[in-house]
Image (cartoon, rainbow, N blue to C red):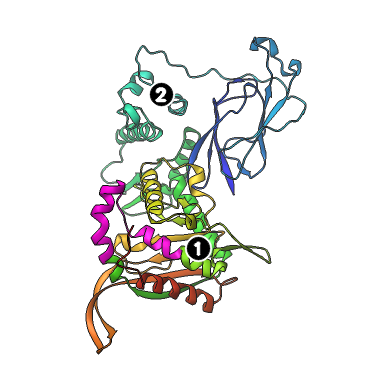
Amino acid sequence: MEATILKWHKNPGDPVKMDETVLEIATDKVDSEVPSTAEGILQEILYQVNDVVPIGAVIAKIKTEVPENIQDVIPLTQVGGQDTAYRMHEQGTKTTADTSFSAPPPAYSSPPAYKPSTNGNRFYSPLVLNIAAGEGVNMQELESIPGTGNEGRVTKKDILQYVSDRKSARGNQHKREPNDTPVSIVTSRPETYPSEVSRNTSANTMAMGSYTGNVEIIEMDRMRKLIAKHMVDSKHTSPHVTSFSEADVTNMVLWRERVKKDFEKRENEKITFTPLFIEAIVKCIKKYPWLNSSLDGDKIIVKKDINIGMATALPSGNLIVPVIRNADQLNLVGLTKHVNSLANAARNNKLKPDDTSGGTFTLTNVGSFGSIMGTPIINQPQVAILAVGAIKKRPVVIETEQGDSIAIRHMMYLSMSYDHRIIDGALGATFLNAIAKELENFDGSREV
């Protein structure tokens, strides 16, 4: 829906090469570098750091068709040619070139770039170098940081962790006296940038004066703040109703147990229950398409594309929802590969903005952490979210030709929260029970 400007790598008047990083943006939960789609001179910046930019807004302009000697084209009023205007698009990082001839701004002076001199062969991204410059990390310190990226490269997370550890070490030199009130301040900032340090420091200072006793104060990272905001917004937007059902998934459990080794050997992929759940959801959405919709004022927008989001826990403890697009067009093997690929990308912080956008229905597996059921919050602007609980063996009554009997079966609870403005209880419960029946009637003799 929108993106936040995190950092400009270029200033007005700076030359820009094709595919060179111009700025960094943050969508809901993914940070991205935006490359230039043209070569020229950055003419104008229309949004500043920390500004929230709506979809379709022009954020900067680049003057193209620049003569070979760039020094000859300053000031900008002497430059002929076409303007390239960067627009913030729905996918988050894509840019397009618009043609315009707006008047150039006054001349600007750009600050000197951070260009450390080193004879080493280690590669540092512009993002890492800018963070190092902003935090006063010299090249000798930078070379001593162990990198967790490809080929031992220092990543954003590595440099921020180093800066945080260094500040903590300095802070320990100024500890309170033993008779002071024991207050531990821990600043968690895996997603913060140098420009945010002053704000976090101010917030921590205020917090120190607000609490007494033996407490620990942890500053929310940017992703956690976004999650908190979206959860509150969702509750304010949609009147939530949650329905519950249970399913006997014995056939599905036994089938997976039977085929998982051969499947992994043949496809080089592990098959989990998630693609099986998604397969059932897709079949039921086709029967009840209103569950795959959104609300725009008084209009119900029924989506023809079925894009299933799957809530995924990150190593940091935060939550992200990568999306499997056109899930109805994938067979079970395709669903499995997409599920595993997105889950691995999420765990390794390699998701792109496109990977988390465009969802029309969300699945969350609360059972993966041992919960038997949950009351999930709708992922706006969707109208429903399904939670599947842990699969447990329980004695249940089953009907046979010889009469009722008690048997040990694999049982699972399902819960679905839905927007009561669009989905009434009858439709919500009918859809949920349809999914339960789909799982119960799983064909245990099917081939993959």
- Check disc 1 and report the residue beneath it: 378
Q: Is residue 379 left or right of residue 440?
A: right
Q: Main secondary structure of the magenta part?
A: helix
At which x and y percent is residue 345? 39, 43
Which of the two labelled residues, at mark 1 and mark 2, occupies the earlier sequence position?
2
Q: Which residue type carries mark 1?
A: Ile
Q: Are marks 1 and 2 in contact (CB under 8 Å)?
A: no
Residue 223 visible at all:
yes
Regarding mark 1 in the picture, which secondary structure is present there?
Answer: loop
- Say which of 271 and 212 sits in front: 271
> Residue 213, located in which quarter of the rendered image?
bottom left
Position of the C terminus, as image quadrant, is bottom left
Q: How much space separates mark 1 and mark 2, taking CA atoms?
A: 40 Å
> Residue 290, located in which quarter of the rendered image?
bottom right
**Residue density around tag 1, few if under 14, some if 14–19, many if 20 or more, within 10 Å:** many
Q: Which mark is residue 448?
A: none
At which x and y percent is residue 234? 54, 61
Q: Which residue type carries mark 2?
A: Tyr
Number of marks drawn: 2
Q: Is residue 369 left or right of residue 363?
A: left
For the point 35% across and 16% down, which residue is it? 121
Q: Which mark is residue 124?
A: 2
Q: Is residue 212 left or right of residue 378?
A: left
Residue 182 visible at all:
no
Region of the chain picked out in magenta, as a range = 254-281
Q: Is residue 122 above or below residue 440?
A: above
